[in-house]
Image (cartoon, grey):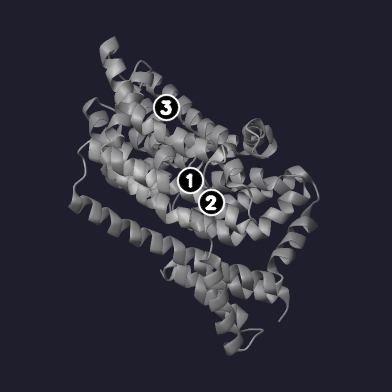
Amino acid sequence: MSIALTTVLLFVVFGVLLFLGVPISIGILVSSIVTALSTLSWDQVTFIVMQKMNSGIESFSLLAVPLFVLAGNIMNNGGIARRLINFAKIIVGRVPGSLAQTNVLGNMLFGALSGSAVAAAAAIGGALAPMEEEEGYDKAFSTCVNIASAPTGLLIPPTSAFIVYSTVAGGVSISALFMAGYIPGILMGLGTMVVAFIYAKKNKYPVSERPTLSLAVKTTLEAIPSLLLIVIVIGGIVGGIFTATEGAGVAVFYCLILSIIYKSITVKDFLDILLDSAKTSGIILFLISASSAMSWVMAYSGIPAAISEALLSVTNNRIIIFILMNIILLVIGTFMDITPAILIFTPIFLPIAQSFGMSAIQFGVVMIFNMCIGTMTPPVGSVLFISCGISKISIEKVVKMLMPYLAVLIALLLLVTFVPALSMALPALVGAI
């Protein structure tokens, strides 16, 4: 079978299964097996696919994924979110639409700690939504602010998205990726703040009262133990004290100790958290396992090279190629979760990006930035759905108001794509590259 027909077969079967509502991991696995059977025997396919699925998750680095999931779940239930919200209010409380600005900063801080956009949207958005409604904020506006800012935690480290990318991209330095995500992640949050500021100023939303010095000091001191997690984990990884996996273990231990000190978690709560983390980790690791099989099928069939040739046959202009890549990734992000998207499409687009002078580190940031935007958009926008659920508002009422935020974030995405220093300066500064 020709490469073109193999490519069509793979993506048509995968697309049909997604349309029928088949779980994405099963869809990936079935479409991979069907495609492989077009050129190999059943015995060969079953042996090789099982082998690739096993080797795909047989990685010490990937052990960090379930550990970071566990750390995020402990934080989500351990009283840390409330302390971060209070701290954020101290910093941005005097800005118009102060609760909306608090939402953005709270999502940036909590997202950076938990590494989960959904956890940030639920924890920070869930706490602030009733307060914003009480102060007369438009429900669609406050929901959009939560949606646009929650994914910042996928860029601001520590985040498992970079760990997954590092594995599939051939062992790119995790510490370099972590440092590369800071500036784009902060820019994403600041862009959301600017749009929220303009809307709040126009609609004369209230400004929080100026806190007393004693309250500001007390709130900051309460938040410092939580914020120290970033310093300990990222400092340890970048400083070479421990690996990303060991850092994830440190994060779990530190979060558990904090939760015990705060007396916000019981033994039963912890057992429930362990069970929930095991379920989430199982889903993620099975996705990685199935995607490893699909990556092998694509490589064996020559699909990445064929797509690369097709894309390069359109133009050899670097700017147009990068724009086309971003458009394709944005579309992919609208219907595919971040983990399988990274695993399936990194082998396709990374060689193209590198052939035009983009480093693997910068491409990782660009890809995850695209996927961040994908979590905000239908039909499979996890952050969009959970934020609308928290606010009890229909998606139709939110999407129109979300457009200015999407426009700003896409502009920032292009900036990150064409200005390498935004993602490469910090890794170079700390000696990670």
Residue sitting at the far front: 241
Q: Amino acid at mark 3?
A: Ala
The answer to whether mark 1 and mark 2 are in CB contact below 8 A is: yes
Nearest to viewer (mark 3 / mark 2): 2
Q: Amino acid at mark 2?
A: Ile
Q: Amino acid at mark 1?
A: Thr
Task: Using a 10 Å C-alpha cutoff, classify the residue at mark 3 as few (fewer than 14 neighbours), some (14 to 19) or many (20 or more).
Answer: many
Identified at 58% across, 89% down, the residue is: 43
Cα–Cα gap, marks 1 and 2: 7 Å
In the rendering, at what x and y percent does residue 318 appear? 77, 45
Identified at 29% across, 26% down, the residue is: 222
Give the vertical position of 292 relative to 63 (above or below): below
Q: Which residue is mark 1?
A: 159
Quarter containing the N terminus: bottom right
Quarter of the image for residue 45 reads bottom right
Identified at 34% across, 38% down, the residue is: 143
Q: Which residue is mark 2?
A: 163
User: Which SS class for mark 3?
Assistant: helix
Task: Using a 10 Å C-alpha cutoff, classify the residue at mark 2 as few (fewer than 14 neighbours), some (14 to 19) or many (20 or more).
Answer: many
Task: Using a 10 Å C-alpha cutoff, classify the residue at mark 1 as few (fewer than 14 neighbours), some (14 to 19) or many (20 or more).
Answer: many
